[in-house]
Amino acid sequence: MICFTVGSYAQNDFGTTKLKIKAPLNTAPVPKKVTPSATAEAPVIKAPDILKNPDAVMPLGSKYQIGETKSFSMEQTNDFINPGDRVRDKLNESISKSLIANGLKEDDSYIRKTDVDFGVIRTKSNYLIVRIRDYGAIDGDLVKASVIYDYKPTVLTNSLLLGPGFDDIRVNLNDGLNYLELEALNRGNLGGNTGNFEIYDQEGKMLISNYWDNIDKGVKSKFTFIKE
């Protein structure tokens, strides 16, 4: 009886006792991590062109790129022209007009400064006769005549003084292309170099008659002969 009573008390104490753990007092929720939307576009920055605008401030909220994209163009622009050149040219033009108006400079605006092309002449002749004289007043015009074949020039007359009457120049022709150049060696005393010419074949038939008028020193009258 005594042993049974002691054993019963021992079993009762261990069977009714429970261990409880209280929850922590700080129950604040853990913040969620926000992930940027996949469709949101991050702000981009555009770098200013420091070559054209050194004091530019980089703007916010624009796309980042260096300089500006420009399409390729063969059109000539005036980006690198010195503005002072325009002022200089206008000033020189004004001075030139003033000198001409006061008789201190010759007005040569009427002088032709580019070569004159008299076209193509076809012939079966072995040679041509070119007749030249001054056109207008006799004022000391000088010309040089050269024929060119296969890129090789041959001087026919080095310094011909044009007078009131015709001077004849014989031009021998090779098969194919032949070129004749009459170069003005000076301006006349009364203006530009002037001349009248006539070209005949070997049968005496005139092929062309014309003139050059008020051309500058160094300007050429050009002819193309094709021997067929």
Image (spheres, rainbow, N blue to C red):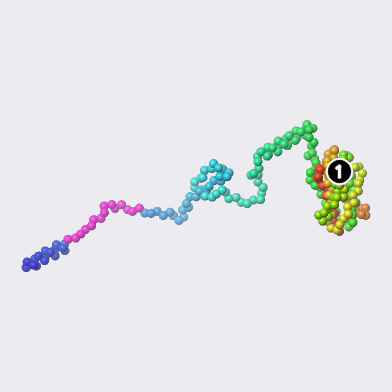
Relative image position of residue 160 (x, y in whole percent): 88, 45
Side of 99 where 194 appears, left or right: right
Q: In which quarter of the image is the N terminus?
A: bottom left
Q: In this view, does 17 lie above or below 193?
A: below
What is the three-letter code of the residue carrying label 1?
Leu
What is the total number of numbered labels drawn onto the structure image? Answer: 1
Say which element carries label 1.
Answer: strand
Side of 164 where 151 appears, left or right: left
- Give the residue drawn at x 89%, y 40%: 138
Q: Is residue 108 above or below residue 148?
A: above
- Asked whether residue 155 is drawn in magenta, I would say no
Residue under label 1: 142
| Overall secondary structure of the magenta section | loop
Q: Can residue 118 be seen in this view?
A: no
Side of 202 where 11 appears, left or right: left
Examine the image and state in which quarter residue 192 appears. Answer: top right
**For the view shown, which residue lies furthest in the left direction?**
1
> Label 1 neighbourhood size at 10 Å, few (<14), some (14-19), many (20+)?
many
- Give the residue drawn at x 50%, y 50%: 44
Q: In which quarter of the image is the C terminus?
A: bottom right
- Give the residue drawn at x 23%, y 56%: 22
**For the view shown, which residue lies furthest in the right direction?**
203
**Start and end of the magenta stretch?**
17-31
Side of 23 where 16 appears, left or right: left
Relative image position of residue 81 (x, y in whole percent): 66, 42
Relative image position of residue 63 (x, y in whole percent): 52, 49
In the image, 10 versus 119, the foreground residue is 10
**For the view shown, which residue lies furthest in the top direction?**
102
- Asked whether residue 21 is drawn in magenta, I would say yes
Relative image position of residue 35 (x, y in whole percent): 41, 54
Q: Can residue 51 be seen in this view?
A: yes
- Give the residue drawn at x 86%, y 58%: 175
